[in-house]
Amino acid sequence: MRAAVFHQHGPCDSIQVEEFPEPEIGANDVLIRVRAASINGFDPMIVQGTTQLKTPLPMIPGGDCAGEIVRAGSQVTGWKEGDAVLPYPIVPGEGMTGEVRMGVCSEYTRFPAGNLIAIPDGVSFEDAACLPIAYGTAWRLVEERARISAGEKVLILGATGGVGTCLVQLCKAKGAHVIACGSSAAKLEQLSTLGADEVINTSSADIVEEVWSRHGKPRVFGASGGVDVVVNYIGGETWVPALKTLCRGGRMVTCGATAGFEPRTDIRYIWSFELSIIGSNGWTPEDQKQLLLAVRDGQVKPIIDRVVRLEETGQAIQDLFDRKVFGKILVVP
Ligand SMILES: NC(=O)c1ccc[n+]([C@@H]2O[C@H](COP(=O)([O-])OP(=O)(O)OC[C@H]3O[C@@H](n4cnc5c(N)ncnc54)[C@H](OP(=O)(O)O)[C@@H]3O)[C@@H](O)[C@H]2O)c1
């Protein structure tokens, strides 16, 4: 089969399309023809080798795919050839697809039948492929971890990415006041169109000054000023400024560290303002099913920047790293 492959960690343009052995399926597996795959924030990190994960080499990138079953193992029941599926990418005993198990930017891929989730009628392969990792993570973060409620002010850093564009939609649906951050005027316009109440251009403005001037400086006594929640999966140099934007009793929620996982902190803000730092990791298969229904019913719209060919996988991952993408980028083998 044709697959996008890298043989060593390094620059994204080292990814080449080549002939790769078609996956062998076990008795409880299915072989899926990949109809759309999506790129995520972790893909550049995996290709470049900047995580602590043990990625097998050679490696096919990509964790999310939607496709149809072409063959089922002898013990598989309840699924048949032609069924449209969106696999849950974390496989028991094998780990995360595209990180420590072979990725999906290829013509075919293998998943255990236990990981399959049916794509409902009315949801395209491309929309479905946007959902698991980015939208699933946003869903759990909003519903289970941050527990966003109506009227809360939510500041979202990196709102222009896969997780971010879903967060904007989910927080708005909860009735929150959304302040979305992005790094260019064009991206800010897209965030406003998506429903953000306010936007901040992080390449020209300081988030602390912007939040303080628009919403007041947070006060320990009197409990005025600031925002209720900051979603911060950027980390690095954004960590301390983000703490300074929170109101007394505010919550900082993180699910990642795009710009650095060992940021400087300032614990004076944490105790003085009684802040909570909340982690959010992954999502459940049930979350993924709920998301598919939300897309079918028009409550969530996958934001697709562009769809590229398998040969452009390396460039797509580089573009994500270079912050040239709004929402999701899809690979269609
Ligand atoms: N724990 C989990 O289960 C889980 C699951 C999914 C994702 N994540 C993590 O969540 C984060 C977001 O994932 P994603 O797929 O949404 O990524 P993404 O599509 O690349 O979006 C991230 C956004 O952050 C901004 N950004 C990128 N590099 C930056 C930098 N060096 N400094 C400041 N801002 C930067 C960009 O927006 P602007 O250019 O507009 O600023 C970009 O749109 C990643 O860290 C990822 O690893 C974790």
Image (tube, rainbow, N blue to C red):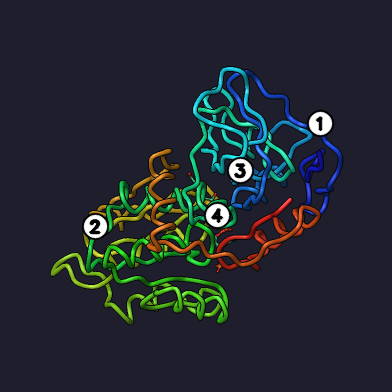
Residue identifier under label 3: 63
Q: Position of residue 142 (x, y in %)?
A: 34, 54
Q: CA distance from mark 4 to mark 1?
A: 26 Å
State how far apart marks 4 and 2 are (Cα). Answer: 40 Å
Would residue 222 appear left or right of 10 to someone viewing this image? left
What residue is shown at x 74% (from left), y 43% (from top)?
Answer: 106
Q: Is residue 201 left or right of residue 69?
A: left
Whether 133 is drawn above or below 124: the answer is above
Residue named by callout 2: 272
- The residue carrying mark 1 is 21
Counting residues from the N terminus, which is met first, the one under dot 3 or under dot 1? Answer: 1
User: Could you tell me which quadrant the N terminus lies in?
Assistant: top right
Disc 4 marks which residue?
130
Q: Amino acid at mark 2?
A: Ser
In the image as oriented, which residue stretches furthest toward the left? 222
Image coords of residue 135 (percent x, y) = 47, 53
Task: Give the amino acid at mark 3.
Answer: Gly
Q: Earlier in the sequence, mark 3 or mark 2?
A: 3
- Name which of mark 4 and mark 2 comes first in the sequence: 4
Residue at image location 51% in from the left, 73% down from the top: 202
Name the residue nearer the viewer: 48 or 60: 60
Q: Nearer the viewer, mark 3 or mark 1?
A: 1
Q: Nearer the viewer, residue 24 or 51?
A: 24
x then y, percent, for residue 291: 41, 51
The residues bearing labels 3 and 1 have C-alpha atoms spaced at a distance of 18 Å
Residue 262, visible in the rendered structure: no
